[in-house]
Image (spheres, rainbow, N blue to C red):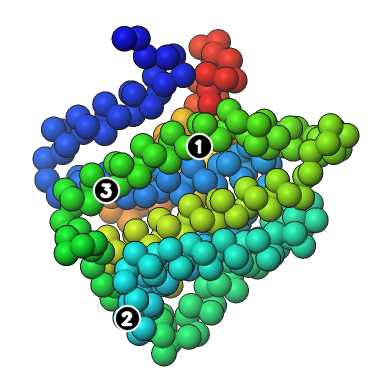
C-alpha cells in the first residue's frame, strides 16, 4: 500500500526519531535530544503565530514559565495531581492569552513587539516576587510526573515521551496549516485589509492562534519542569523568549520544517561551541549574523528556493 506524498515528512521524522537512539552513546546525548524536542514543539506553536499569522511575540517564554510553575506550585503547595496541574497551567496560559490578545493585537509593528515584551516581563516579575509560592530567584523543586502508578524517570523514558509529543505536534501543525483555518492565517499575514474584504474575522483568528501558541508553550513548560525536576525564573525571562524567536527566524518563518531545523541547530550549537572556552557566545553570535546576512528568510526557505522547491513543499 503506497503512502500519500503529503505524509512523507511525518514518516521521515518518525523514522529519524525511531533510529536516533541507536546512535546516542550516553545520557548526555539523550538529554540534548530531549531539549531539542521540547524547543521544537514550542517553536512549532510560535511559528504558527509569527511566521504564518505575522504576529510578533517577544514575551513567549512567559507562557512557558506559567506551565512550569503551575506544575511546580500546584502539586507542592496544594496537593494536585501533576497531570491536573499541567492542564491547569495550560488553561491559565490560554486564558491570559485570550484576555490580552484583543487589546494587544490592535497594535502594529514595534508597538506590538513592546506590548508582548511587557507581558512576558510582567509574568517573569510575578514569578520572582511571589517567593512564598515560587521560591523566588532560587526556584523550587518539581514533583515527578506519573500516571496510574507509573513514574517517568530517566533520559531514555523521557526521550520516548518527547518523541511521541513531537510527532503529534508536527502532524497537528501541518494539518492546521493545510486547513481553512491555516489558509485564513496565511491570508492574514499577506494583507489584513484583503482578508477583511474576503470576510476573514482577523481579530478572531489573531486571538485563536495566540491562545493556541500559548497552550503549546505552557504544556512544554510543564514537561520541562518535570523532566529537569527543578524550575527557576530563568525559564520565563526575556532571554529565553529571544532564544525561541531566534529559532523561528534561523529555521525559517512560515515553515514547519524550519521550526524543527531551527530548534535542533540552536539547541545543539551552544554545546558544539563549548570547546571555545569563554568565546562560545561570541562564536554563536557571529554564526547568527552570518545566517541573517546570507539567509535572511531562514535556512529552510532559502535552501528550498535555491533548489527550486515551491512554498507548499517548504511547509
How far from the left and from the top, in percent, is residue 95? 60, 65
Residue at position x 46%, y 30% in the image: 257
Mark 1 or mark 3, which is nearer the start of the sequence? 3
Residue at position x 47%, y 80% in the image: 128
Mark 2 or mark 1, which is nearer the start of the sequence? 2
Mark 3 or mark 2, which is nearer the start of the sequence? 2
Q: Nearer the viewer, residue 130 or 84?
A: 84
In the rendered view, does 187 fall on the left or right side of 247?
right
Can residue 259 be seen by looking at this rendering? no
> What number of labels is visible?
3
Mark number, residue 161: 3
Rounded to the nearest angstrom, the CA distance separating label 2 from label 3 is 24 Å
Rounded to the nearest angstrom, the CA distance separating label 3 from label 1 is 18 Å
Q: Nearer the viewer, residue 146 or 241?
A: 146
Residue topped by disc 2: 79
- Label 3 CA crowd tier, 10 Å (few <14, some 14–19, many 20+): some
| Mark 2: secondary structure | loop
Residue topped by disc 1: 173
Position of residue 150 relative to residue 80, above or below, is: above
Amino acid at each position: 500500500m503506497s503512502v500519500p506524498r503529503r505524509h512523507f515528512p511525518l514518516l521521515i521524522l518518525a523514522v529519524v526519531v525511531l533510529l536516533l537512539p541507536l546512535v546516542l552513546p550516553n545520557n548526555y546525548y539523550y538529554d540534548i535530544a530531549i531539549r531539542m524536542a521540547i524547543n521544537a514543539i514550542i517553536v512549532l506553536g510560535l511559528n504558527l503565530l509569527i511566521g504564518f499569522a505575522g504576529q510578533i511575540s517577544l514575551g513567549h517564554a512567559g507562557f512557558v514559565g506559567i506551565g512550569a510553575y503551575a506544575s511546580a506550585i500546584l502539586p507542592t503547595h496544594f496537593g494536585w495531581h501533576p497531570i491536573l496541574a499541567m492542564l491547569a497551567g495550560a488553561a491559565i496560559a490560554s486564558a491570559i492569552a485570550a484576555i490580552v490578545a484583543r487589546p494587544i493585537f490592535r497594535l502594529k509593528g514595534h508597538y506590538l513587539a513592546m506590548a508582548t515584551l511587557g507581558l512576558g516581563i510582567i509574568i517573569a516579575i510575578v514569578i520572582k516576587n511571589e517567593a512564598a509560592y515560587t521560591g523566588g530567584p532560587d526556584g523550587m523543586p518539581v514533583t515527578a510526573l506519573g500516571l496510574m502508578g507509573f513514574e517517568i524517570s530517566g533520559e531514555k523514558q523521557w526521550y520516548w515521551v518527547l518523541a511521541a509529543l513531537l510527532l503529534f505536534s508536527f502532524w497537528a501543525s501541518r494539518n492546521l496549516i493545510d486547513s481553512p483555518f491555516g489558509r485564513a492565517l496565511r491570508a492574514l499575514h499577506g494583507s489584513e485589509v484583503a482578508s477583511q474584504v474576503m470576510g476573514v474575522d482577523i481579530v478572531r483568528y489573531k486571538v485563536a492562534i495566540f491562545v493556541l501558541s500559548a497552550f503549546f508553550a505552557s504544556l512544554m513548560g510543564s514537561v520541562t519542569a518535570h523532566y529537569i525536576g527543578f524550575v527557576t525564573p530563568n525559564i520565563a525571562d526575556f532571554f529565553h523568549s529571544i532564544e525561541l524567536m531566534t529559532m523561528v527566524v534561523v529555521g525559517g518563518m512560515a515553515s514547519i520544517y524550519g521550526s524543527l531545523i531551527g530548534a535542533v541547530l540552536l539547541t545543539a550549537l551552544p554545546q558544539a561551541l563549548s570547546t571555545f572556552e569563554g568565546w562560545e557566545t561570541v562564536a554563536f553570535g557571529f554564526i547568527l549574523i552570518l545566517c541573517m546576512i546570507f539567509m535572511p528568510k531562514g535556512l529552510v526557505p532559502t535552501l528550498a528556493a535555491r533548489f527550486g522547491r515551491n512554498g507548499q513543499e517548504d511547509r
